[in-house]
Every structure is written in structure tokens, then in C-alpha cells.
Amino acid sequence: MSERHETRAEDLRPASSQPLRFRVWTAVLRADPVVRGIQVVKRRERLLTVLQAGLGLAWMALFLLAPLVYILSLSFWQRGAGGTIVYEATVANYQEILLQNVDLLGWQIGNTYLLILWQSLKFGFLTTVATLALGYVPGYFLGRTESRYRSLLLLFVVLPFWVPLIIRYYAWILVLGNDGLITTVLGWVGVASNGYLYNDVAVVTGLVQVLLPFMILPIYNTVNKIDDEYIESAKTMGASPLRAFYEVTLPLSLPGISAGSILVFILAVGSFMAPALLGGPANMMVANLISQTFGQAFDWPLASAMAMVYLVVLFAIITVFNRFVGLEEVFDQ
Amino acid sequence: MSYVEVENITKRFGDVTAVDDVSFTAEKGEFVSLLGPSGCGKTTTLRMIAGLEMPTEGTIRIDGDDVTDRPPYEREIGMVFQHYALFPHKTVGENIGFPLKMRGVPEAERRERVADVLERVRLPEVMDRSPEDLSGGQQQRVALARALVFEPDVLLMDEPLSALDRVLREQMRVEVERIQREFGITTIYVTHDQAEAFAMSDRVAVLDDGRLSQQGRPLDIYESPDSEFVANFIGQSSQLSGAVGTPDGTPVLETDAGVTFELPQSVAATTGDRLSVFLRAEKLDVSREPTGAANEFPAEIATTNYLGEKTQFFCRLEDGTELIVAKHGFTDVESFEPGDTVYVSVPPENLVVARDPGTDQQSGTAGESTA
Amino acid sequence: MKKDGELSNGSDTAGSSESTESSGGAPLSRRRLLKAGAGATVVGLAGCLGGGSDGGSSGGDGSSGDGGSSGTTGTATSSSGGDEMADTLRFYSWGGSTQEALTKHLIEPFEEEYGVTVEQSSFSSQDKMLANVRSNPAGSYDVIMPSLSGSYNAVKQDLVEPLRLDNIETWSNLLPSFREYNPAGTGDDTFVAPLYYGTVGMVYNTDHVSGSPPFSWELTWDSEYSGALTLEGFAFVRMFTTALAQGMDPNKMEGDAGSYEEGVKQVYDAMAEQHELVKKYWTSGQEQTTLYSNETAVLGDGWSGRILSLQNDGYDNLQYTIPEEGAYGWSDTFAIAKGSEHRYTAEKFIQFAYRPEVMKSLSPVIGYPPATGATSSDIEALPDFDPTGGERLKFQDQKFKEQHQEDWNQTFEQIKLGQY
Ligand SMILES: Nc1ncnc2c1ncn2[C@@H]1O[C@H](COP(=O)(O)OP(=O)(O)O)[C@@H](O)[C@H]1O
Ligand SMILES: [Mg+2]
């Protein structure tokens, strides 16, 4: 018997001190074919683990990577007559959306794609700031309250998710529209207007309402995890409640703020329906442009290039943000 | 008038009475411990002194000022929390400087004072580190430094050593005591560990289920607990109950277990009184043969436990009642086998006597030790 | 009713579009579902390209595949073979009220007469329909429903079979103007069978706009209606209508000097001027309804069907008219999907649709006049009805559009962004 076999059976006590049937079993277990068999099974197990991990990766590859690669490759082809695709590699699409009508020396940018991308980022930024301003207090309150109604209140925060997005935007049309709630109410006090729809403010308002939960929930989550002892110890050291908030609670809730901000920013920049339904003649965002290029103009290659550039820009922004805020912290929590 | 006066404070959380009519005091510079099992209301009491909890009833005075209704940030109190509560987003220096910053101390002076206090807790050169990078003992010192740096009127500590392992805990016990003496600060210290309380405190207040059982010097509390609870909670003792009888003219306690005890002189007992005696394990003697000592009775060995510094004998009386006897520096253990009969004795003055509950007299007045 | 390139997400049927229905039994087989799933993946991909929708929930039909695939893929090659009626016909049409009308007045009578089971699925926009036909295996659909402008792309992308007119005995019923219009510019072959037509005409609110027809498109440049004007948001329709207003041939856009460059500049200038007055560019029927009914807009363009139904709902102050310069004409058509296994049946379906009695019952319910000569008092009362038999209709030259569309789109965006 080789040493390897010995170690395989190391959990068995010395054979001599065992009853006969144990000794028989020991011998059987130490037999070469059996040991081999065990090894194979063990290897199988490892194989299984590899398979499981592989499955996860394959899933990712199929649903995340494959579409991305497909879009990336599309972006290097060209549109042919009638929306066909000409399979001739070119960077013309990228040139068109990045360089056309761009005169960096003269500070002139007349490039529709870049302008619309810029407009989208602007909307994203405004929406993020507004949701933060409106979402911090509820998030904080939910995180700190000991009310037994907290679960119920949390439910209210996510309740809007059950209402289809489009209906929520149409609801804003009813509120902001010409014969909507606000015009009617203002009409009673003698302020006449033609509604408050179809402008920047309407778009941001809609986005803020829709995306608010994405700000409230991460803030709630981090504030909820802040140990009372931190705040109490600040107070015993002479901090008034306001001071304790500023010095302790606020900085400790920063991870929630940045998580919420990133979520809201990404979702807002990529929004489609808000500008389409609530925006005015000039309020186009990058998703609308891509969709229009994809659908109406049937220029899949150009639309793909737009999507890729959009992705890269967004990724870059998040990376920079990460540099300053430290996203790892957010996900560490 | 004492420096800190806690007068009849009660705290109720809904139906739960966490603290029930508790009063105690601390003199200036004194180290007072609140000792009691978990859930007895120690933390709640401490939090009321800090102002983090408002008493339902009662008054708290510090240096003559009624602070009962003052918020914590107007109380000049340094507090060390159980888990230290060091701010993870601030450096050690910023943590310690925090109370100074709240008091408007300029940056430069702050740094100086922080460095100074770090020196005094023997933890230099950690100023710019994050508290999370420090060991438990170091965090403890930082928490202490932070509570002391602004020279508060009172230092409050809530089981500050409980998160440390045993060796470190015993080191820190000495260290905390040293620092407290050095700063000369009035300290109220919460713990459930009797040894800790006894080692560090000038005086100990024992809490039982929200009520104050006894307060006094560690020695007094140990030697003459004035209630069954205190006697049971402090140290290892066995309890025997019985009725007072006077077969020879002098009152003796005839216990239900069949053993008769001569009572200490100081105990005023009359025939028929129901009393309990607490037999402290290390105050009992044990021998193979009767020695003729007072209060000697036979018992059977159930088990022996050799612990090194001492040996425990678990003995059984005739009716099955168990007793623990502890002998220090005892080496002849192996000669005692389970089943052996031994003779246990205790001098009357080493008996702790308490009146049984349910009798008319006030509890805690029966025991008077000669010590 | 839906038109060319209607905005897909956010249209009024977004919630229920692209459902797979089966009129006349034939439950979904497992196989069909699987195929539908495969289709859905590609559609999902398209969703990715769309840049994602607000708040994560998809705006509608991206994920619900449009079933319809061959049960016997093995025989797909001999698809167009036999000139016999098949048992089933896979029909892919606009959803919503159009689908309802088609089902009741065309599909059910057809099924009854020929004993064919029509399996229906629906789409909510032309680009979704084309994308699905393009990405599903050949033979997944038999009859599809492109608009005239969509049909150009469909032909170019090789998604449709030519019609064998000999098999469509009622073909001569088609109005001459449609027979002559050859959107794909493909010479001899005919690919689409127009079903009904309409225009993007002028809509005005009589409480705010005085005068009576005929109006000129010039009115939509009147600053009096600043902030109360709404116009269709697609560049090619804007270009067409503006060119008409400028007195140009919208399929040449030659200005006074006779060159396209100058003509198109003139059109752009006019659009930029008009843009200042626009409250909102609409992209769906629902949006028109909202904008006109709550008087956010009192003047603009629109679809007669929408205005008709608003009038039926009591909005008597809303009127639809074709201005004196004419209006952008559109038509929804039937075409046979490439690789159809039931091509003959599909042709017989078209033949059936062109029967006068079928058109007479269908057209008034759809709300638009038929592309055939069928007529009745109900049909003549339709706002888009052209008594000249379609001669007044103006259609876009798809080749011309294809040639210039990219510039039009870009410039229109620049105008909207104030960068023109
Ligand atoms: N905020 C609170 N609400 C309700 N009950 C409380 C609260 N704080 C403490 N208690 C109760 O009061 C009693 C004493 O608690 P505590 O002071 O924390 O005890 P200790 O510190 O001695 O372990 C316990 O029964 C506890 O459950
Ligand atoms: Mg406690």
C-alpha cells in the first residue's frame, strides 16, 4: 500500500483494534480501484464547482457581454440603403458623433449628439441634486425613526414602483398640463397660465418623482445602520443635535448618498419617457436620440456607436466620482 | 452634599420599569461602580446621568446643580461607551479633539491638548491614524482620552472593558484606574463583573432588577451583604435557611437541612425568626476528622475540582443540600475521593446572616458583621 | 390608428402591444413559445440600444416576443410552392383599435369563408415590426403590415416577397394613384397592397382660430399661435409639409433658383422660424389627443382619425382639414413576409380584403378611406376621403427621403436645440 493510500484512510483507526467487519471494510476502502473512484468523485466535485462558476459567467456573458459585443461590432459597420447594414468596417460613425461640427479651437460645438449628451448629463445632474435635496430628509427619518409604522412608510416609498412608469408620467401631464391641477388651482387665485408642461422643469419634476425612491432607499439603509452610540457620544461631548448631525450623521450617511446619487444619475441620464412625454420641443435626451436613430432612421450602426460613446462617458463619470467618494465603501457597507 | 447626587430616580419604558427609585452619590474624585447582572438597569441609570435618557421621576445633581432636565450637550460629562463609539470617519486626533472643537477651542490648542492627553493614556503617535486601525486596547485608551480631554465634571463608563479579552481586560483595569486617579476625576463605572468593580472602585452600588440593593465599600459589600441577592451575586456562597431556636438559652439557627449554627453575637434574633445564613466558600474549613470547632457538621464529598490557585469541594449534606467549599493553596486533593465523609466548619463571625423575605422586618437589617 | 414611424415607447398602446393572439383556436405550442423567446432576446437587445428606460421598467413591448414561427421549419425552402389554401395564416398587424377592426371586419369573415385559421400578433411601431421580421427566422410571418414609408425599408432589407398580382383577382379595385405609386422604386415587382390611406392634415380649434377652410399651411407660421402650436415630430414629415407650405414640390425641394441646396435651405429656415412657435412636437396619437383636447395646442397638424374620435367625444371645436397646398399622405399596406410558407393563402387574403363589401364595412370602422374604389356614404363622410380617387394625395418619394434623411434629421435636431 502506498503512502497516499494510507493518508486517504487516515480517519480509520488502526485496523487490528477493530472488529472483523471493520477490517474488511478498511481493506475494501483502501483498495486501489476504490481509492481511484473516490478521487474521480472528488475531481467531479471540483468539476461541478467549476461548472457552477462557469454557468454564472456564461449567464453574464450571454446577457451582458454578448449584447455589448454585438453593439460594439455593429458600431463599426455602416448603414446601407433602406436601413440595411453594410459590413465594411469603418470609424465613420464615431467620427460623425464625436467630430462633426466640432471646432474645439473656436469653442464651437454644433454636434447634435454631443449637445444632446450634454443636455442629458445636465438633466441627470439636476435630477440628482433635486432628489438628494428631497430624498435625504425622508431617508434620514425612516432610518432613525423607531415608529412601528416604519415598514408601512417604507412600503409607501416603494409603492410607486407598482404603477407603470408611463402612467406616472401621464399623471404628471394631468398635474402640470393646461387644464391640470396646478393651472386650475392657480386659476382660482387669478393666475392665468397655459400649463407648466413641456419644458426643462417638467422633465426634471417627472424624473425626480420617479427616481426619488432610488435616493431614499440607500440613504435610509445607511442611516439606519448608523449606531445610535455615535450620535449620543457626540452629544455627550457637547454637540447640539444639529451639530451632531453635521459632524456625525451626515458624514456617516455619505455612502448612502453616493450610492443613491449614482443610481439616480445613471437612470436619469438614460431616461427616455420623461423627455418624450413631459419635455418641450428642445428637450431631447440621449436615449431618445439613440432610439430615433435606431428606429426611425434605421441606422443601427450609428445608433450603436452612440450607445457605446454614451456608455463610455457614463463609465468615465462614475469612475471619476468613485475617485472622490470611494464607491468601494458604498458596497463594503 | 455630595458631588454627584442621584435622588430617587425611576425610569419606565412603557410597562417596563428599568430603574426603580434608585439613589446613590459620588464624592468629588471618587470612583463609584454600578454593579449588577445584565438587564438590571445599570446602563439606563448611567444614561440618565449623561442626559441621554430623561428620568420618569427623581432628580440628578452635579456639583449642586440640578441637571435633570438638561440635554447631554450642556452637562460637561465624559462618557465611554461599551463599544467606544469612536467616529470611523475621523482620525484619532479628530476624535479626541471633537469635544474641544465643540467648545470652540482653536485648532492649534486642540492639537496640543490632544497630544498631551494621548501622552497621558500612553498612546503617542496614533494621532493621524484611523481608529479602525487600532487594537481593542488602543481604541479603549482613545475612547478614554476623548472623554477626558475636555476635563469634564464626571466620567461615565459603560462596561468599557467587556469587549476585550481576559488578559487585556485585566491590564486595562489597572490602566483605567491609574488614569482615573491621575486625572482625579469623579467616575461612575458600570459593570456586571464583581472582580472589576471591586478592584477599581472606592464604592460599589449593587443593582437588582432596577432597584438599588446595597452601596458601600467593596469590603463592606463583600463581608456584610445586606440582602440575599447581594450575598448570592457577590462571590460564591451556599445558602441555608432555618428558624431561630434557643435550646441552651443562646439563640441558634436550626436549619431545614438539619445543621445547627451558632449565630454571631451581633445578630439580634428571637425565637421563631426565619433567617438564612450564607456560607462563603472560602470561609469554610474542611477536614477529615472532627476538630471540635464551632459550627462543625459532617458532609459527603460529591466532587472535587482542582483549579490550581484553589480547590473546590462540592459537598452534600444528609438531606441532599449542596455546599461549596474553596480552599486556597490546597495540594492534598487526591486524598479526597467522592463518597468520603468530611467535616465542614465555619466560625460564627464568618457567617453572613439575612432575614428571609416575607418576614416583617425590613430586609437588609438582620446582618451585622464584626468585621 | 398608427402611422409611419410612430414613437414606439410611450405610445398609447405601450402597455398592451405586441401581444400574441390567436383568433380561431390554435393555442401557443411550446415550440412557438421557445421561438418567440428567441425573438424576444433580439428585441431585448434592441431595447438595450434604446438606451434603457426611466427607472428600470421597460416602456412596453421590448420583452414580449411576437410569436409566430413555422411549425415545420424543415419544409421552409419549398415555402412559396403550392397554389393551395393552407390551414393557417400568420398575420402581424398594428395593435389596438386597428387590430380590433381588422379582426371583426376582415379576419373573421375570411376565416369563415376559407376555413383558414389566422394567427395574429401585433406591433406598436413600424421599426419594431421591421426589426422583428428581420430578426426572426424566415417564415415566422405571412402577412405583415408596413406603412408605405416602412415598405421601402422592408424591400431594401429584403424582408418581403413580391406580390403575384395574377393571384389577386381583385387587384384592379386598387385606386390608380396607388397602382402608380412605387415607393420602393423596384421596377416591375409590386410588394405592397395598400389598404387605406390618410393624411397629416391641419387641426384647428374653432374657439381660437377664426376663418374657414380652405386654410393655408402659412397659418402655422402665424405668431399669434406662439406656444399653442403642435406639430408632428418626425423630420421627414416636417420637411414634406414645410416644402408644401413653401410652394415647392416636396419630393424635389427645389427653391426659386431650382437647386436642392437652396430649396432645402429655404425649408430649414422656415422650420427654424416655425420652431419658435411650437409648444410640443407630438410623436403619438395619444399625445395629439391630449394636446388638442386640453387646449394646450389650438393649431397644428394631426391625424384625421384622432380628431374624428375627439369630435365623437364632444370636442366639436376641433376641426380637421387638408390645407390648400395639400398634405403628407400615408397608407397602411399588406405585404407578404419573406419566406412565407403560405404565400398563396396570403395573396387570397389580400384578394378578399379588396372586395368592395369587405372594404365598405372595414373602412368606416378604421376611420380612414379605402385604397380601393369602394365607396359609401359612410366612407365619403370620412375627413380624409378624396373624391378625386386619390389624385389629390401627395406621397413622399422614398428614394428622395432615403437620400436626404440623415441631413434632415440632423438639421431638425439642431433647430430644436437652437443650434441652426
Ligand atoms: N429604550 C428602552 N425601551 C424599552 N426597554 C428598555 C429600554 N432600554 C432598556 N430597557 C429595559 O430596561 C431594562 C434595563 O436595561 P439596561 O439598563 O440596559 O440594563 P443593563 O445595562 O443593566 O444590562 C431591561 O429590561 C431592558 O430591556
Ligand atoms: Mg448595559
Image: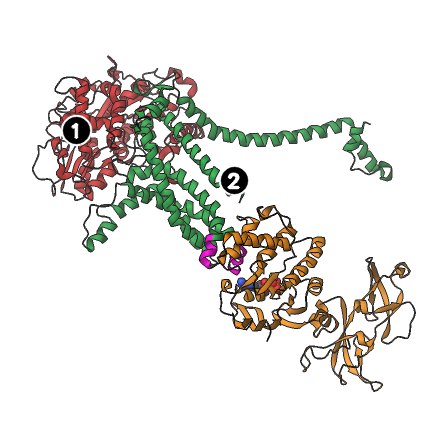
Chain colours: A green, B orange, C red
Q: Is mark 2 within 8 Å of ligand 2?
A: no
From the top left corner, tell me how far across and down residue B44 is, in percent.
57, 65
Q: Which x, y percent locates residue A157? A: 41, 50
Camera sees residue A299: no
* Residue drawn at (12%, 31%) of the image: C218
The quarter of the picture where the N terminus of chain A appears is top right
Q: Which x, y percent locates residue B331?
A: 88, 59
| For residue A126, above or below residue B67 | above
Quarter where residue A275 is shown = top left
Kindly indicate whether the residues beneath marks 2 and 1 are on one polypeptide chain. no
Circle on res. C270 = 1
Residue C316 versus residue B346 in the image, above or below: above
Q: Quadrant of ligand 1?
A: bottom right
Which amino acid type is marked by label 1? Ala
Q: How many marks?
A: 2
Q: Is residue B318 visible?
A: yes
Marking on residue A39: none
- Chain at tag 1: C
> Which of C261/B12 is in front?
C261
The image shows residue C6, relative to residue C160, as above or below, that is below
Q: Is residue A330 magenta?
A: no
Chain letter for mark 2: A
Residue interval drawn in magenta: A228-246
Is label 1 in a helix, a strand or a loop? Answer: helix
Disc 2 marks which amino acid?
A: Glu
Q: What is the residue that sits farthest to the bottom in this orientation?
A: B249
Q: Could you tell me what secondary structure mostly forms the magenta stretch? A: helix
Label 2 element class? helix
Mark linked to residue A328: 2
Left or right of C262 on screen, residue C283: right
Depth order, front residue of A88/A84:
A88
